[in-house]
């Protein structure tokens, strides 16, 4: 029997207990042994909970119990999750987590501690919720040189942008509605400012490169400036607007960023709508591959955590190889990366636009302004030209 302790009995933690209970037979067979929850750590009271006998408040009880093989860390946040995970790994207990904040901040350190103590630190649920993406990167695409990882990694913003696209509504209105329905947090900054997607692409980029990509160094722009008018132009161009998180190998090094992009109907990520997530990978032997599914929610996320528990159970006393060194990657400057830009400017700027950007097709859907698409150029060059446009309304990057 493999005994598990769940740290944090919130949405994902209670989902883990539910998945283990509901799929007990399948999970036991796949793990090669019965998986049993021994403890649930949480400071809150759960008087009516069917598992109330397992709930404890003292972490020492769990960390000092030699019968506990695996910790499932679904607390979220940096502390005390970091200290608890470190101590568990140091005593040879494997840790499975959905905590992207912690993985992005301390992933390689925790992986090293796990290796030194012949156990595992697994984090499938930290990116893309229930979508298998960490395991494909770590196990399946090992014959590949990965050239680019592009993801829709945040369900809240994808839901908001999809609604804006379909209903022609404004950002604030859709955000309010999403909050009422419980799809968006009361404090939505982590999602709408792109911080959540930034941590997730930091994790994927680190696995893509094999070294540490610091999330603080990833250029991050959210969706708060996207308007209903932008979608009118996107529709005219046969495109939509998505918050993309991307890491790409270029001749100047790796460029990583999170920003809203216009993407074409033909792009595989175009049809990823609502709360769904997807990760599109371009690699040199397989070519394009995409991983799609529910990127959040109790049971999808819990399912990914439990898949890690099964992996730990299959590897008791052995560490699964994960190439994510502690050495930091020096990312290339986003300003040096090249792309096309969609631009909106006030009526009367036609001549200046022609001088700066050459002959462009002018798109007219809103009175008093027009839009156009530039040729491919570096961000730096675009910024320089845009400074000369006195009545620039907005610009959105285009994904090739
Ligand atoms: N707030 C996140 C999202 C939850 O909207 O995708 C999953 O990490």
Image (tube, rainbow, N blue to C red):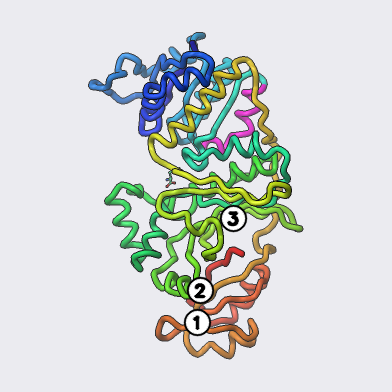
Disc 2 and disc 1 in contact, CB within 8 angstroms: yes
Residue 237: which disc? 2
Task: Answer yes or no: disc 3 within 8 Å of ligand 1.
Answer: no
Q: Which residue is mark 3?
A: 257
Query: Which badge, 2 or 3, comes first in the chain's sequence?
Result: 2
Give the class, few, some or many, for how many residues have Cα within 10 Å of label 2's Cα (few <14, many ≥20).
Answer: some
* Numbered disc 1: secondary structure: loop
Q: Tell me the magenta residue range.
A: 102-115
Outermost residue toward the right in this view: 251
Disc 2 is placed on an element classified as loop
In this rendering, is residue 150 above or below 299?
A: below
C-alpha span from label 2 to label 1: 9 Å
**Earlier sequence position, callout 1 versus callout 3:** 3
From the viewer's perspective, is residue 161 above or below residue 323? below
List x then y, in percent, for residue 267: 56, 60
Local secondary structure at mark 3: strand
| Image x and y of residue 127, in percent | 52, 41
Residue 113 among those drawn in magenta: yes
| Residue sitting at the far left | 48
Q: Earlier in the sequence, mark 2 or mark 1?
A: 2
Ligand 1, seen in the image, is in the quarter at top left
Tell us which disc is closer to us: 2 or 3.
2
* Residue 363 image label: 1
């Amino acid at each position: 029997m493999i005994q598990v302790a769940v740290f944090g009995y919130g949405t994902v933690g209670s989902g883990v207990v539910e998945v283990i209970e509901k799929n007990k037979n399948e999970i036991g067979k796949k793990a090669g042994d019965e998986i049993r929850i021994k403890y649930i750590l949480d400071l809150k009271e759960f008087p009516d909970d069917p598992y109330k006998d397992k709930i404890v408040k003292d972490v020492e009880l769990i960390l000092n119990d030699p019968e506990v093989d695996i910790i499932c860390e679904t607390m979220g946040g940096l502390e005390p999750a970091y200290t608890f995970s470190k101590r568990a790994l140091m005593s040879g207990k494997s840790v499975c987590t959905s905590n992207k904040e912690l993985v992005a901040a301390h992933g390689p350190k925790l992986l090293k501690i796990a290796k030194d103590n012949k156990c595992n630190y697994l984090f499938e649920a930290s990116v893309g919720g229930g979508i298998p993406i960490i395991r494909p990167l770590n196990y399946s695409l090992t014959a590949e040189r990965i050239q680019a990882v592009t993801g829709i990694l945040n369900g809240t913003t994808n839901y908001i942008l999809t609604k804006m696209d379909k209903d022609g509504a404004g950002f604030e209105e859709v955000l309010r509605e999403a909050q009422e329905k419980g799809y968006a947090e009361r404090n939505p900054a982590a999602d709408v400012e792109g911080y959540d997607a930034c941590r997730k692409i930091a994790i994927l980029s680190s696995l893509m490169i094999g070294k540490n990509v610091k999330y603080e160094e990833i250029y991050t722009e959210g969706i708060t400036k996207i308007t209903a008018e932008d979608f009118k132009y996107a529709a005219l161009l046969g495109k939509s607007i998505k918050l993309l998180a991307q890491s790409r190998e270029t001749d100047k090094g790796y460029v990583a960023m999170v920003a809203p992009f216009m993407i074409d109907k033909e792009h595989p990520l175009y049809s990823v709508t609502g709360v769904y997530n997807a990760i599109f990978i371009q690699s040199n032997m397989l070519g394009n591959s995409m991983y799609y599914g529910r990127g959040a929610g109790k049971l999808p996320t819990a399912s990914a955590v439990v898949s890690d528990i099964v992996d730990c159970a299959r590897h008791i006393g052995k560490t699964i190889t994960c190439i994510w060194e502690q050495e930091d990657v020096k990312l290339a400057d986003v300003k040096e990366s090249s792309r096309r830009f969609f631009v909106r400017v006030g009526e009367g700027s036609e001549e200046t636009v022609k001088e700066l950007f050459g002959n462009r097709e002018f798109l007219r859907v809103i009175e008093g302004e027009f839009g156009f698409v530039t040729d491919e150029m570096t961000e730096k060059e675009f910024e320089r030209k845009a400074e000369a446009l006195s009545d620039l309304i907005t610009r959105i990057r285009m994904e090739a």
